[in-house]
Amino acid sequence: MSVPEVSLTEETIFTWGAPPLKFGAGAVDEIGFEMAGYRARRVLIVTDSGVHALGAPQRIADSLRRYKIESEIFDGVHVEPTDDSMNKAVEYARAQGDWDGFVAVGGGSSIDTAKAINLLTSCPGELMDYVNKPVGEARTPEGQLKPLIAVPTTAGTGSESTAMCVLDILSMRVKTGISHWRLRPTLAVIDPLLTMSLPPQVTAASGMDIVCHAVESYTARYYTAFDRKKPEERVTYCGSNPVSDLWCERAMQLLAHSFRAAVHEGADNLEARSDMMMAATFAGMGFGNSGVHIPHANAYPIAGMVRDYVPEGYPPAEPMVPHGQSVSLTAPEAFRFSFSSAPQRHLRAASLLDPDADKHNDEREQLPSVLVRLMRDIDIPNGIGGVGYTEADVPDLVPGTMKQQRLLATCPKMPTEDDIADILTGSIQNW
């Protein structure tokens, strides 16, 4: 039977991938068993000093030891990683010799740093060789990386599911990333018990990252709307698609049920914590394939150009805008902009996030109003003005957003510089 040849003017193929998943209370104590399955004998545990002090990395080292696996703990991860902090982590790992595998334990910062270590100890070259264009060279990893087990301790980034790592380029004052399917962790181990002591501010910010991952992915440009590509030209973000949609819808339902409870009752509510961990992973399984768009593109300069804002609940006390905050601050205005490109998707997202929300006469306002009400309830800063920016800063922020073409290309309604300026200006205050 022959396959007919047809002339195709639009994309007909989407890709979807995710790591195997082990989920449940106590799952962290089975990492030794899992890593032994990869025949690893020497493993680097990558974390930050705060997580190290809480004891989880040592528990993982003990689990590895039970299976005769040697390990060392590197706790030099910088919260909101930079090119400098990632280079130092890579230098440390290279100086210690060869590793058979890696375990990342912490938030997205630790998991993303471990991805960079894995890449640059497995493949030739330096960090900027692999950073996305136009900031870096976007080199493709030449071969398979080492086993990487990702153990998130916050419910937000979904980095345990994704094929990208994010970092600040200090010299350019811009946040960008490295994207390739080989970066995706080999296994995600999700233990809700590791999140029980998270402060409310961290829970709130991390949770808004889940919200934006799910909604941006769900409202992203549909995969068939892209020009047909050769296999080697397909990128990690392929557009919204039937499989990613399922994960994003379920993530939004979990958020509706448990997000506020996790913020306000997190120390005593294991069910809410479990739902948030599951929502983060599910949203990662969605956006890690379909992509995100304007809120995340705006987040990069918002985080990269911060001056004086110091968030509560985040050590050390230095100016920064946590990633989950930075992506949320322009989301209401961004979804007003994108509404006309996919009205039913925006309305469905609003309904999933808040089934009981009052319906506005202006349908364009339904999703923004749901987001604003949620952000107010969990004490997210009121727009970019809440983290120190004014209308006078907008012209300086716009170029940082426009550099994120990898993200903006996924928006179903491609924004101009003037559009981004209007979105940022409209986001000085959200209420």
Image (cartoon, rainbow, N blue to C red):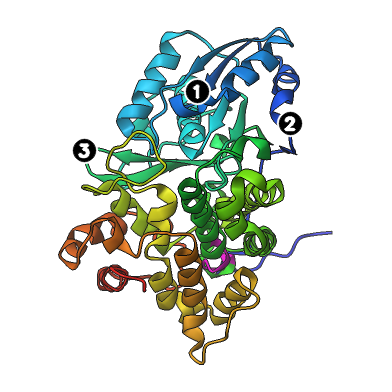
Q: In which quarter of the image is the N terminus?
A: bottom right
Front residue of 332/269: it is 269
Amino acid tagged 3 = Ser
Residue 271 visible (yes or no): yes
- Residue 263 position in % (x across, y down): 55, 53
Mark 1 and mark 3 lie on one chain; the one further toward the N terminus is 1
Find the distance from the CA under tag 1 to the CA under tag 3: 31 Å
Number of other residues with Cα within 10 Å of mark 3, as a class: few under 14, some 14 to 19, many 20 or more: few
Residue found at the very far bottom of the displayed protein: 361
Front residue of 129/337: it is 337
User: For mark 3, what is the residue?
Assistant: 171
* Quarter of the rendering containing residue 8: bottom right
Dots 3, 2 in contact, CB < 8 A: no
| Above or below for 63 versus 304 | above
User: For mark 2, what is the residue?
Assistant: 26
Q: In this view, does 175 lie to the left or right of 183?
A: left
Residue in the image at 73% along x and 65% along y? 4
User: For mark 1, what is the residue?
Assistant: 53
Q: Which segment is the magenta one?
A: 217-223
Residue in the image at 32% along x and 33% along y? 83
| Above or below for 65 versus 216 | above
Q: How many marks?
A: 3
